Amino acid sequence: MGSDEKITLLYVEDDPDAHELVSSMIARKYPELKLLAAADGCAGLEMFKRNQPEIVLTDIRMPVMDGLQLAAEVRLLNPETCIIAITAHSDTECLLTAIEIGFNHYILKPVEYRKLFAAIDQCLVVLSLKREVNAQNAQIRSLGIALAAHVEELETANQDLEAFNYSVAHDLHNPLVCIGGYSRVILKQAADRLDKQHREYLREIIAKVEGMEQYLKALLNFSRSTRESLQREPVELSEIVKAVVAELKQTDPERNATFLIAEGVMGNGDRNLLRVVLQNLLGNAWKYTGKQQEAVIEFGAMDHAGITACFVRDNGPGFDPVEAEKIFVPFRRLAGADGFSGFGIGLATVRRIIQRHSGTIWVESAPAAGATFYFTLEKGLP
């Protein structure tokens, strides 16, 4: 029933004079009501079944079926119906039965219309509120259905984009390998027959191919961070950090860098994906401290809102805090980052993996003050 439809009142009364008088008073007071009439409880029950009125006003003593029995039947059919007794009988047994059945109001004859109207007013307020709530619930359900459909569309679109990303990155790899491979062969076997300019062309081709291969590798890793299944297990993150640090040191053994690694830091998650997280965070710290006289890179853990937050801290150049969210967006790089290698995918990959672990990642930084990346592997306190 819509919120703008008329509320229906069923009046059941076997006394024709009383029925005519009360009905006329109600119609005059409440012209917005739809009034129905019945001369006994049995007829009233049939009318209730057909019309489902929200308010039932009934006498108690009536032939065929009295008002108490009618009210009991109405309660079974619709427990939310407002039922008002209007009767000359006020004995204790009748009142107790009316209370047990669940009458909302009890009006004695001769009718005091002030009391009757007050009872009807209360019923109308309750019914109006219920209609508003029902309308709001219906709207919420409708919005929920629309939102769910929209989310499903977005998920499908994201899946299509992921599949496209993976397919493009995978399918471009082989042609690039061929271009790079043949260019190296030509440069090696025919270098003495080429002039300087053409040798430089080949070296430029090889360098661009290698850069593109690294770019495609980053794309594939970004895609895998969502596509691969998640296998949770207890993982000693400190040991993974030590292994990654050893790999970084091999890339530049002469570099002056100090690593501070907290012992025994544990996490619960996918070992392979968490290694990707730490490789990216530590690799970033290694890269951006490359111009420091002495690089200091730290891995540790702390309590954050009742859960463990791990962190990777460096003494690199840092950046403006207003740029913090941008660094987690795919292919977005900070201003001034052109002097450092990268494609703007690593931190986006990290955030995806952390989100898949139901965790959170954030960064604190300031210009010339280094950067600290924090991450959790579970939801924090609300």
Image (tube, rainbow, N blue to C red):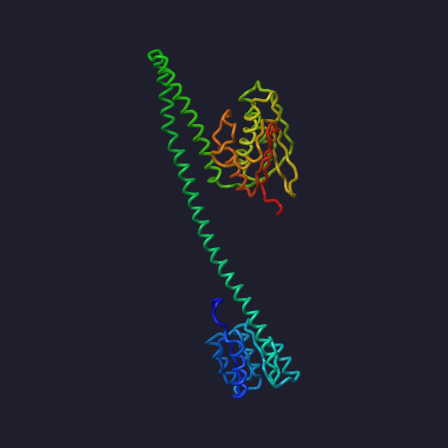
Residue closer to the observer: 228 or 359: 359
Can you see residue 102? no
Residue 30 vertical placement versus 338 (above, below): below
Residue closer to the observer: 357 or 321: 321
Residue 241 vertical placement versus 116 (above, below): above
Residue closer to the observer: 172 or 327: 327
Residue in view at x 66 percent, y 83 percent: 92
Q: Is residue 310 left or right of residue 42?
A: right
Can you see residue 90? yes
Give percent across and percent down for residue 308. 63, 40
Q: Which residue extends farthest front?
A: 28
Give percent across and percent down for residue 90. 64, 84
Give percent across and percent down for residue 246. 57, 25
Q: Is residue 209 left or right of residue 12?
A: left
Q: Is residue 206 left or right of residue 16?
A: left
Give percent across and percent down for residue 12. 52, 82
Residue 292 vertical placement versus 241 (above, below): above
